[in-house]
Amino acid sequence: MLSNYKLFVLDDDHQYAELLVEIANEQEWDVDYETDPTSFLKSDINESTILVLDLFMPVIDGIEVIRTLADKKCRCPLILMSGFDSKVLHSAQQLAEAHNIPVIATIKKPFSINEFITVLNSARQGIETSKTLDCDKIKFTRSEIENALVNNEFILHFQPQIDIATSEVTGVEALVRWEHPKHGLIFPDAFVWIVEQYDLIELLTRKVISAAAQSQQSLKPDYPDLCMSVNVTAENITSLFLPEQLKNLLREYDIAPESLTLELTESAVMGHLTSSLDVLNRLRMKGFHLSIDDFGTGYSSLQQLYQAPFNELKIDRTFVSNMLKDKEALVIVEICIMLAKTLNMKVLAEGVEDLAILEKLKSLGCSQAQGYFIAKPMPLIELKHWLSKSRKPSTTSLGI
C-alpha cells in the first residue's frame, strides 16, 4: 500500500464512486470517496491526495473544483473522468495544468475495470519513481542564490539534437542545473523564477553564457563548427545593454555572435513588446540568431512570428509527446511545421520520447528533434563520450 498517498474519488453518483473505491481497494490503495463537492472542498486536501474527479456534477462541477483547488494553492494530482464531450475533458486537463495542478490521466466514461486499473498502476509507477524536488515547498533565500552564483553551483547539462532525415547529430541543448549542497541536483523550474524575483537573472544568464562558451572552447578542437544557444528571460530582453554585453562576453572567448542563438518564449516577448523588439532587432543586426521556444503555448504566437525577427521555431514538448494519442496536439504540430517551412525558419521538435514519435515527425517533414529517446541531458564529460560515437554536430543549443 502507498502509505504516503491517498486516493480520493469525487463523483456525485454513489454507485459509481463505490465501485471505483472497491476496485482501488483491491489494488491496495488507501481510498475514500465523497459525492458532495462542497464537503470535499472543506476537508483536509494536500499534495498527497490523488483526486479522481468527475467533471460533470450538477451543483458544483469539476471545473469549479479545479478552480477552487488552484485558489487554495492545493496542487493534488488529478485523474479526470467524464462522460461528456471528450474535448471538454481535454480542455479541463489544460486548465488544471495551467494552474500547475498535475493531471495523471484522463478517462472517458463509461470505462472498463481494466482501464481504471491501468490508470491506477500508472499513478503508482509515477509516484514510486518520481524524485523531483517540490519547488513550492522549498523557498530559497537571496543569500542562497548569491552564494550559489559565487561558488559556481549552477552547472550545464547537455542534450543532443539530431537531423531527423539523416539521424546525424546537429547540436546539443545545454540546460542549467543547480548542484545544491543540501538538496542535490535542482532543475530550473524550481529556482529560475526566484532568481528573477531577486533581480539576479542577468547575473545568472551571464554565468550560463560563460559556461556555455567555456564548454564550446573545450569541444572546439574536435567540433570546430559548434554553435551555442542560450534561453533568455523577459528581464534579459528588456535590458537595452544586452546586445553589447553579449558581444563583449563572446569576444572574451573568441566566439562570433553568429555562433550564438538566443531562445526565448512568446510570453517573454509579449511582456514588454516595445523594448523587446528594440533589443531583439539590435541582437539580429549584431549577428545573433533568435529562436522562439515553447511555440504554441503563448497567447500571441502568430503575432510573434510577424513582429519579431526569429529564425528558429521550437515546437513545445507538450504537443510533441502527446501527438500520437491526441488529435488536437497532432494538428498543432502539423501547423507549426507548416508555418516554419513557409516562413523559411528552422523547426525543431522537443519531447521526442519514442521511435514512433520520431517517425511521425519525419513523415510530417520536421527537420530536427531532441528528447529522451535520442539522448538524455548529460554533463560535459559524458557528452564528449556520447559525441565520440556520433558524427560531428554543426550546432549546439544552450538554454536555461
Image (spheres, grey):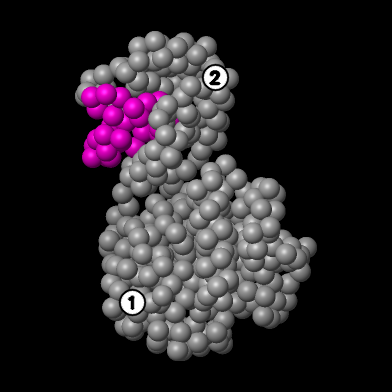
User: Which residue position is annotated with label 1?
Assistant: 276
Front residue of 337/169: it is: 337
Q: Nearer the viewer, residue 121 or 151?
A: 121
Crowding at label 1, few (<14), some or many (≥20) Cα neighbours within 10 Å? Answer: many
Q: Residue at x 32, y 52 (%)?
A: 140
Q: Which residue is mark 2?
A: 112
**Is 77 drawn above or below residue 36 in the view shown?**
below
Q: Check disc 2: other Cα within 10 Å, few if <14, some if 14-19, many if 20+.
A: few
Kindly identify the residue that appears in the image at 39 percent across and 71 percent down.
304
* Left or right of residue 255: residue 154: left
Residue 77 is covered by the magenta coloring: yes
Image coordinates of residue 324 in percent, x first then y, are: 60, 45
Q: Secondary structure at mark 2?
A: loop
Q: Quadrant of residue 48?
A: top left
Where residue 76 sits in the image (x, y, percent)? 36, 33
Q: Which residues are magenta?
A: 51-79
Q: Quadrant of residue 200?
A: bottom left
Label 1 amino acid? Answer: Ser
- Any magenta on residue 253? no
